[in-house]
Amino acid sequence: MANLKAIRVRLSSVKSTRQITSAMKMVAAAKLRKAQDAIVQLRPYAGKLNEIQAGLSAALRDTEFENIYAERKNSKGKVLVVVITSNRGLCGAFNANVIRAVRRLMADKYLEQMQRGDLWFMPVGKKGHDVLRKLKCNILEDHSDLYSGLSFERVAKVADRLTELFLTGEYDTIEIVYNQFKNAAVQRLAEELYLPVSVADTGIKGAVSTDYIYEPDQVSIVSELIPKTLRIKLYKALLDSFAAEHGARMTAMHQATDNATDLIRDLTLQYNKARQAAITNQLLEVVGGAEALNG
């Protein structure tokens, strides 16, 4: 009977867990639809803006205009990495993939900066912040509160802050690590150079050959366009990560629900077998007692 009680308690616990994971899956699916619509609508605009900025930057290379957003010749090599994770867990390997990429940057690409203390981090998301704090990394600022009401206005302030840190010479390289949304089941890890800005960063070959008519003038347009492009770039990264998070959580909860269903089936079978064995033992005891009395 003790074994039957243990199985019954575990069966009840797994059923409760399945109800929770099923509810979380439906909530994540509802949030995913809204987040997916937001990133899908922004991508064409962000891509075209990036293309125009690439063409303008290329056209300015042969002029006397000094692009303050370009790579510096005499740089200190100080690096800032924006680590975009989630505030909550239960989303599979979503956060682990970003942390793994950050560890790789620390061990390989920016090893020299890490050793001399010139590698700093700006986490967006509590999961990334907690890991970086445990690793005793240099944390400049924590912007995990961006997810509570994610909007372009709030992200633009952080983007302007990053631009200011670059223009003042505080950091020479700013990079973003996040998950790109591909579909509900697939997230693609991205490591993007945020600053300095150059034509090569965009990866758009056709943008260089575009012939633009400038009004009022080329320099004024570039000076206004680059900060706007940087704001859109950071906003797009956050929307990508936000949609990817809900997709990863929906997939993880779907798998957890299926696993709970399989476990419930196995526990039910195990319970029925144990109950049948207990009833058989009781019958044998009754028959044995009756034979003893008759004898």
Image (cartoon, rainbow, N blue to C red):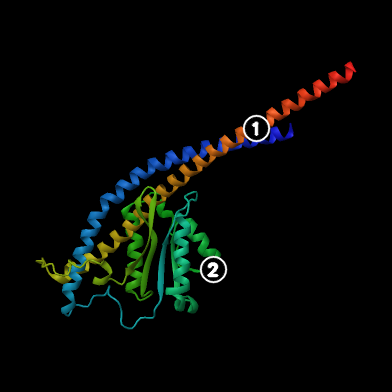
Crowdedness near tag 2: few (<14), some (14–19) or many (≥20) residues, C-alpha within 10 Å: few
Residue 152, how many percent across, how many down? 31, 54
- Position of 56 compared to 232: left or right? left
Q: Quadrant of the N terminus?
A: top right
Residue 156, how many percent across, how many down? 32, 59
**In which quadrant of the rendered view does residue 5 lie?**
top right
Q: Amino acid at mark 2?
A: Lys
Residue nearest the viewer, comparing 103 with 277: 277
State the residue position of label 2: 136
Residue 225, how many percent across, how many down? 21, 64
Q: Amino acid at mark 1?
A: Tyr
| Residue 180 position (above or below residue 276) | below
Q: Which residue, as the protein is rendered here, is positioned at the far top? A: 294
| Residue 224 position (above or below residue 25) | below
Q: Which residue, as the protein is rendered here, is positioned at the far front? A: 295
- Position of 43 compared to 283: left or right? left
**In which quadrant of the rendered view does residue 208 lie?**
bottom left
Residue nearest the viewer, comparing 209 with 273: 273
Q: Are marks 1 and 2 in contact (CB under 8 Å)?
A: no
Residue nearest the viewer, comparing 232 with 179: 179
Crowdedness near tag 1: few (<14), some (14–19) or many (≥20) residues, C-alpha within 10 Å: some
Q: Secondary structure at mark 2?
A: loop
Residue 13, how many percent across, how many down? 60, 37
What residue is rendered at 61% in x and 33% in y? 269
State the residue position of label 1: 271
